[in-house]
Image (cartoon, rainbow, N blue to C red):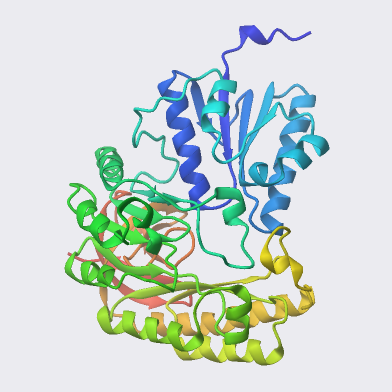
Amino acid sequence: MRTKSLKQNKINVVTLGCSKNVYDSEVLMGQLKANNKEVVHEEEGNIVVINTCGFIANAKEESVNTILEYVQKKEDGEVDKVFVTGCLSERYKPDLQKEIPNVDQYFGTTELPGLLKALGADYKHELIGERLTTTPKNYAYLKIAEGCDRPCSFCAIPIMRGKHRSTPIEDLVTEAEKLAAKGVKELILIAQDLTYYGLDLYKKRELAKLLKELVKVEGIEWIRLHYAFPTGFPMEVLDVMKEEPKICNYIDIPLQHISDPILKSMRRGTTREKTTKLLRDFRAAVPEMAIRTTLIVGYPGETKEDYQVLKEWVQEMRFERLGCFTYSHEENTHAYKLEDDVPEVVKMQRANEIMDIQSQISWELNQQKIGETYRVLIDRKEGSYYVGRTEFDSPDVDNEVLINAEDGYLRTGEFFNVKIKAAEDFDLYGVVVN
């Protein structure tokens, strides 16, 4: 029999899903480190914590497969303990306990103290902003709120994350200061819905006020907005964006669809006319703004006409950034009562067609950048190129700027002025200029 007690316990945190999960894993790792635990992120360790995603079918499948993989490693003696946390565990804990009993314990999204206790650690309330960041050192996610109060028919997030809960401004400023002290230069603000920020704490939307406080943090040079909702958008945010150079001229606003019958069924609380006006108001207020959106095709009842309306609207609006997903039929959501009547092959065809249209739009917009000079933040070196981003691009999902490494050494995490020499549909090529 193996003698486990001779081995120093090393906790390996495995993160699946979105940036909000990345943030949660970083908080968990910060707590473990404060308890003098040895902790690593997606490396070898004899104790494994899997932070799961339960949002749509593909994500759930990846989470289940990862759990099964580590349970097998446990049975083979390669790891000693496997713990599961996150959205999948929150949503399906009884089913998972029954189907995969070899996991040591399952925890939901709000059970961090319990998870820490199982790992032999105490939850330290005083650790505001103490995280072990897993992103490149120059940027970090800042989660400003948890949960969501929106009633969107297709979304299971409220089931997994609960009601909207804003984090107080002073706590977020403290966290930003600690990140800046570690060398973070870009904050990416995330929440299920940024626009709702402050309503629960301050009885009014206070995203603009939060931004005004965050720009005062020394060392932070870019602040980026992710996941705004199209109804109730606090327009004063655009004034702050215009006035404060630290606020990137960028917004991620998932719109999901534009055909009125689909928007109504999705319970989005808006119409094509209102959404189009909002985007035009954005462009009028901040003409240089890059707008990123995501769309869903194949929602129950989506007709050829609904899809045609969406397709033509994408061509008309010319988004700088766009992602398109096929509808996933999720139990316990309002839309689950509807018939999932668009065949999977049709969903894929529609998604691919939208992305082909967007690829052409992106190529045309990128051609206009040739000859222009942009401030670029270098994220990494990959092969023979340094890879960076402009303020109009978020990590992992948007365009990148490639600079030939043979032209000279560039320190990652630093800003350089880069002149664009060539452009493809999703990449720019440039040279550093003084």
Picture layout, residue 360 above or below residue 226:
below
Left or right of residue 41: residue 377 = left
Say which residue appears at 70% left-offset and 90% top-offset. 304
Using the rendered image of the protein, determine whether residue 285 is visible from the camera's viewpoint: yes
Quarter placement of the C terminus: bottom left
Residue extending farthest to the front is 203
Q: Nearer the viewer, residue 89 or 136?
A: 89
Q: Number of marks in the image?
A: 0
Measuring from the top left, give residue 167's x and y in whole percent.
36, 46
Measuring from the top left, give residue 349's x and y in whole percent.
71, 80
Picture layout, residue 129 above or below residue 115:
below
Measuring from the top left, give residue 43's x and y in whole percent.
57, 33
Q: Nearer the viewer, residue 340 or 289?
A: 340
Picture layout, residue 347 above or below residue 191:
below
Say which residue appears at 45% left-offset and 66% top-offset. 398
Q: Quadrant of residue 207?
A: bottom left
Say which residue appears at 69% left-offset and 69% top-offset. 335
Q: Nearer the viewer, residue 298 or 79?
A: 298
Quarter placement of the N terminus: top right
Q: Quadrant of residue 364?
A: bottom left
Left or right of residue 295: residue 73 = right
Picture layout, residue 374 above or below residue 62:
below
Using the rendered image of the protein, determine whether residue 318 is visible from the camera's viewpoint: no
Q: Nearer the viewer, residue 51 or 229?
A: 229
Q: Quadrant of residue 155?
A: bottom right
Measuring from the top left, give residue 280's x and y in whole percent.
36, 86
Say which residue appears at 25% left-offset and 58% top-offset. 211
